[in-house]
Image (spheres, grey):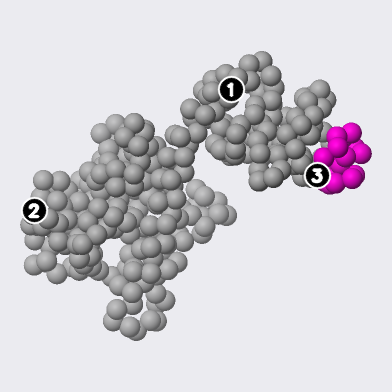
Amino acid sequence: MTITQLITHSGGFHADELLSSVILTQLFPDARLIRTRNKSLLEPASDKIIYDVGGAYDAAAQIFDHHQRPGPLREEDEKPYSSFGLIWRHYGFDYLVAMNVPADDIEAIHHKFDTNFVTPIDLLDNGAIEPSVAGPLSILTLPSLLGSLKPSFDDASPTADDDAFLVALPIARAFTEAEIRALAANARAKGIVAEAIAKTGASAILELPMGMPYRSSLAKAEADHVMFMVCPRGEDWTLNGIKLSGDTFDQRADLPASWAGLSDAALEEASGVTGAKFCHNARFIAVASSREAIMKMAEIAVAEL
């Protein structure tokens, strides 16, 4: 039967049911989204999906709550589910199809999104981790940012919570879709980067046809000898250092210290390369006007290691 009602609780909202709503409204765009605690509306039916309320986790009855005791746990590691994790578990594959993710990439992206995006929401919502784990950036985490959209304590409007929820929903959707697009892009890039690594051979310079994610492919190929990456950017070309990980600014190798912060004629003089245009003061990127110029700069950078 067609789903006509998507039902979650009324009152204040959290990231888990908000992000669940992102998934479900994508899959069932004609269904009515209802925020309520009215027990008669929370009675299960074949045309309803009830989540983050209802007092049960019963996929067959289409009820996905996690507040009951004991709450649902992941089988592999016994980490607790929130409604978001439950909805992702049962509807995530369909959501990725709806987002036009290639069939060959769906399983891997489903797992990676669950690990990197869904599980942290689940843990935070269940109190299994504290917001303080993010340190001074805790107020900038996605749950905190979405929570900041709640109405103020003295907003007397009877629809304040629902109005705020509807404001927050497209923002939550934008973050969710952006993450899925990024994961899909990473999957597309892998084949291109693998081919480029093979072409690179023993060289310390990896050339790519455009900017794209490449660090994970370097690690998988165990291409530890690659120190720099070059690619076109608009009408220019860039020479990039390779970060050791996404959690640090440290690189496998820095660009020459004598180039730091220079541009145009000053950089041409310091590097000896006609067409050199810019080098960041932190020595992680340089720009030149042609492939020939950027390759000369890359060769110099390698020679000075």
* Residue where numbered disc 1 is placed: 197
- N-term mark: 3 or 1: 1
- Please tell me whether mark 1 sits on a helix, a strand or a loop: helix
Q: Write down the region rendered in magenta.
A: 260-275
Q: Position of residue 55 (x, y in %)?
A: 16, 55
Residue receiving disc 3: 277
Per the rendering, the mark at residue 1 is: 2
Give the side of residue 86 with respect to residue 245, left or right. Answer: left
Residue 150 in view here: yes
Quadrant housing the C terminus: top right
Of all residues, the one furthest to the bottom in this rendering is: 156
Which quadrant of the figure has residue 224?
A: top right
Provide residue 79's location: percent of width, then percent of height.
Answer: 32, 39
Amino acid at the residue labelled 1 = Ile
Residue ID at (34%, 68%): 165
Badge 3, how many Cα within 10 Å: few under 14, some, many 20+?
Answer: many
Q: Nearer the viewer, mark 3 or mark 2?
A: 3
